[in-house]
Amino acid sequence: MENSKYHEIAEAAVQLFNKKGYHATSMQDIADYVGLQKGSLYHYISSKEELLERITSESISGFVRELERIVKKDISAKEKLEQAILMHFTRVTDNIPMTTILLRESFSLSDDPHELIKKATDHYLNLWSQIIEEGMKSGEFKSGDPRIAALTILGSCNWAYRWYQEGGKYENVEIAKYVTNMWIQGIIFV
Amino acid sequence: MENSKYHEIAEAAVQLFNKKGYHATSMQDIADYVGLQKGSLYHYISSKEELLERITSESISGFVRELERIVKKDISAKEKLEQAILMHFTRVTDNIPMTTILLRESFSLSDDPHELIKKATDHYLNLWSQIIEEGMKSGEFKSGDPRIAALTILGSCNWAYRWYQEGGKYENVEIAKYVTNMWIQGIIFV
Amino acid sequence: MENSKYHEIAEAAVQLFNKKGYHATSMQDIADYVGLQKGSLYHYISSKEELLERITSESISGFVRELERIVKKDISAKEKLEQAILMHFTRVTDNIPMTTILLRESFSLSDDPHELIKKATDHYLNLWSQIIEEGMKSGEFKSGDPRIAALTILGSCNWAYRWYQEGGKYENVEIAKYVTNMWIQGIIFV
Amino acid sequence: MENSKYHEIAEAAVQLFNKKGYHATSMQDIADYVGLQKGSLYHYISSKEELLERITSESISGFVRELERIVKKDISAKEKLEQAILMHFTRVTDNIPMTTILLRESFSLSDDPHELIKKATDHYLNLWSQIIEEGMKSGEFKSGDPRIAALTILGSCNWAYRWYQEGGKYENVEIAKYVTNMWIQGIIFV
DNA sequence: CATGAATGAGCCTTCATTCAT
DNA sequence: TATGAATGAAGGCTCATTCAT
């Protein structure tokens, strides 16, 4: 209850950073959005960059948390990959504004916080690679470079932050399944 | 020879926009990079935004030009798709700075030039969809939504602007072939 | 009390625009005058031009307001003309800086605010013409073109912004009466 | 013939200073007008201000020259005044751009050249005052302050630079005569 | 808590002028 | 003469942040 004002501000930042970009959003914009004077924002946050830090780190943490859960499961690599793609794609598309900020704006962080995001992202990538490597070793997947495979799959899902629109022809889960299928079986008929 | 100063400036912009981002790059930065006073830049360009316009539109034009060449060829849809992926991936990775600016900064353009980029991008996407639709109709490809397939494949290649590094373990062409393979045949053993 | 800073700024602008001209006055000059940083001025105004707009429109409004009062009176055209000349001349000379800005700088406004000033000025001229036409119709005044007569009389008074100096040989009201007399009776002995 | 380029430049300055104002006119504007590069202008002039100096001093000189001719004539003060008003009004209206610059922009000159214009203007005013004083002494004119009378008459004529338009209802000479009449006889029926 | 005045650094851009060619 | 590259100072304005009230 007490933090509610902070969350209003963070939500304003999410919406505005998403829409206009981090640099193009002013503290004035945020203050207007929540109905405060811009000086008052500093009772809740310590800087504009802190907002970006929190948004991006919350965003990446969510991805990591979910993937860790999947990795730990006692299922085949193929099933893990299916679930990972499904999770990642729906998470991107369920939360376009935050994901957009994570993917497009985190490089605007200054060195230290940027490093934190990069580390989390790296960890996330490692979890992906692990799944794929597991499948390659077990013979489920064709052999190849697990890291590059992971990056490629991730890229294909991440990109959705640029094109997916709610209320379009398909639900995001449908698309997620389609994408999963493309990855698992390829696009060509055997 | 005569335009050389303009090209120096444009090149400086490419490097700096890539490294620091469009908003975080000042005209002073560009001037320092080329060894002029910042006022002097305006003999060669009319505004900072014009630089961004030129860089992004040159970048997208290159992709379009190459893809149009492929689309026109008298080869199977599968071959077109292979060539398209190869072309797109290598173009992204051969020219990381420009592609980064196209993909990350073009949304900082103001409305009119932004619209131009969006139109060109749309056209590019249509060409991709066309190839895929062709393959679906001919029975080469599994049926599905061509546009979503195109966006997914594109995303997987675009993302390389974030992770590909020259001088790494593999040449970009090798990776491009690997990615093509994953898309064509899937990641799973039959 | 609360607006006092805005008024200080406006007053500074009046003094400086009068003395140096609108273009030759910088925001720095104004800031120095009121003892603020130039960026701080923008808490009170939205642009340099806005200052000019307000000054000029306030100035012309005063003239219009006073003349409307005179026009409505139930007195002869001759008396109205006398009062109008007296009012206009003393208003010009009581407030040289503002009038100077109105007369010398309003053409520096951009199109839309300039149009507003021109409309108000036109209205003011029409009121003058009305008085004169009235006198011509009633036979008080020699017949002629009322608009040109009005412009000529106005010019003779306006010009005082260039030469009248407080503390000179005569009070402005004395001069105003003299000017009125010249207009009413001419300069020649009958 | 050789000076023709200089005169082109001066003419461009007259047109542009009149239309946009001295400060709002750039050397680039002038260069464009005459079809040179702005650097090339400096083969003909030494500075932007010099242009303003020449234009204003040429303008005031013309007025002085003409009035001196009138003052020297062996005619009555009344006739001199009539001729002076006619001359001044037609000169203003025959050459609106130059007169506009003289009347509106000469205060933008820096101290020394400004002083020259002020001296010439003062001399011009003295000639007017002389005529009027002569008439007052001879009993032709009502007695009063000759300088103030002169300034008032001048103002009424000068103002025409703001409102007179060629091709309007009346020729400027007609208006000049009307103005003369108003001054000589007053606006009221006896 | 909230305000809003104030800061000070920085931004993009303009411009009169100079000068080597 | 004419060019056009280059300067360097200045201009109006924005903005994240601070702080007394």
Image: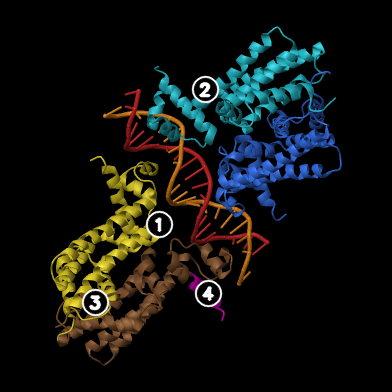
Chain colours: A brown, B yellow, C blue, D cyan, E orange, F red
For label 4, the residue is A8
Task: Give the residue type that dot 4 points to.
Answer: Glu
Residue at image coords 44%, 67%: A19
Mark 3 or mark 2: which is in front? 2
Residue at image coords 20%, 61%: B66
- As helix, strand or loop, the secondary structure at mark 1 comes to helix
- As helix, strand or loop, the secondary structure at mark 3 comes to helix
Disc marking residue B132: none
For label 1, the residue is B112
Tell me if residue D137 can be seen.
yes
Callout 4 environment at 10 Å: few (<14), some (14 to 19), or many (20+)?
some
| Cα–Cα gap, marks 1 and 3 | 37 Å
- As helix, strand or loop, the secondary structure at mark 4 comes to helix
Task: Give the residue type that dot 2 points to.
Answer: Arg
- Rendered-image quadrant of the C terminus of chain A: bottom left
Which chain letter goes with mark 2?
D
